[in-house]
Amino acid sequence: MKLYANEVSSATSRVRIALALKGLNVETQSVNIFGADAESRQPEYRKVNPQGLVPALLTDEGTLITQSLAIIEYLNDFHPEPPLLPAKLEARALSRSVALAIASEIHALLPPRVALRLSAIPGVEANGIADWNRHWIREGLTAVEATIAGRRTGPFVAGDQPSVADIFLFPQAINTERAGIDLSQWPNIAEIVSNLRAIPAFADNAPAVRK
Ligand SMILES: N[C@@H](CCC(=O)N[C@@H](CS)C(=O)NCC(=O)O)C(=O)O
């Protein structure tokens, strides 16, 4: 298998965490995603992934899988241990809900392509983009906190084992702190993230800081 990846990308970090939890090694091809003429925007990479995004996973059968949740569910089906979705139906749904709340309602508003487009609008400055990012992070994580408050039964979002919800939460939480936002305002998230930091598969695969 080959993973098209970027070390700063939080969506790639999710897949790296899942691979580490499973103990799987894959070949990695780094794709630059920053700047108007980034490699990810070039026709060559669009032939690989028409969305021009990372991560993307090329399976041993030669099939390309895009979107981190689909990639992680594929890996979970391919190599079932340890399971990355809880056994109980409601907990499985909660885990996917939280993963999607982060991927679709927070992260989707923050990546390089969004910043690039915002910066092309006359009058929008770098601090305006930083403000935009903090707004969507705060609104999104406040909703995630309310979603999981009272429903947690263990040290993680949905149960006694890390699941896809934790895999999506961790990189977002790391980037939230890097944006200067204190996690302590969301007590459940702060506690879960502190538990996840103690697990090497998470700690070793956080998104890198952009140089
Ligand atoms: N929903 C996608 C998001 C993928 C995504 O936005 N990846 C970012 C890096 S974290 C990217 O490739 N960005 C390139 C760009 O924004 O131009 C997933 O979960 O895989």
Image: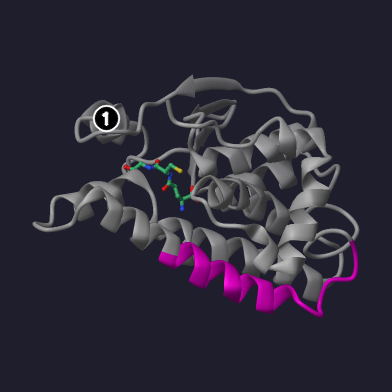
Ligand 1 visible in quadrant: top left
Is residue 43 shown left or right of residue 169?
left
Is residue 37 shown left or right of residue 1?
left
Q: Judge by depth and name the residue closer to the eye, 136 or 178.
A: 178
Confirm or reject: label 1 Cβ below 8 Å from ligand 1: yes
Quadrant location, the N terminus: top right
Rendering quarter of residue 146: bottom right
Quadrant location, the C terminus: top left
Q: Judge by depth and name the residue closer to the eye, 122 or 12.
A: 122
Region in magenta:
135-154
Q: Which secondary structure dominates the residues rendered in magenta?
A: helix
Please check the rendered image and state whether residue 143 is part of the magenta-colored stretch, yes or no. Answer: yes
* Secondary element at image label 1: loop
Q: How is this picture coloured?
A: one colour
Q: Which residue is mark 1?
A: 38
Q: Residue at x 66, y 68 (%)?
A: 185
The correct choice, above or below, for 145 with respect to 20 in the image is below
Q: Residue at x 87, y 59 (%)?
A: 155
Q: Judge by depth and name the residue closer to the eye, 94 or 193.
A: 193
Please check the rendered image and state whether residue 88 is part of the magenta-colored stretch, yes or no. Answer: no
Q: Position of residue 54 (x, y in %)?
A: 44, 38
Q: Position of residue 74 (x, y in %)?
A: 65, 45
Q: Residue at x 90, y 70 (%)?
A: 153
Q: Position of residue 14 (x, y in %)?
A: 61, 43
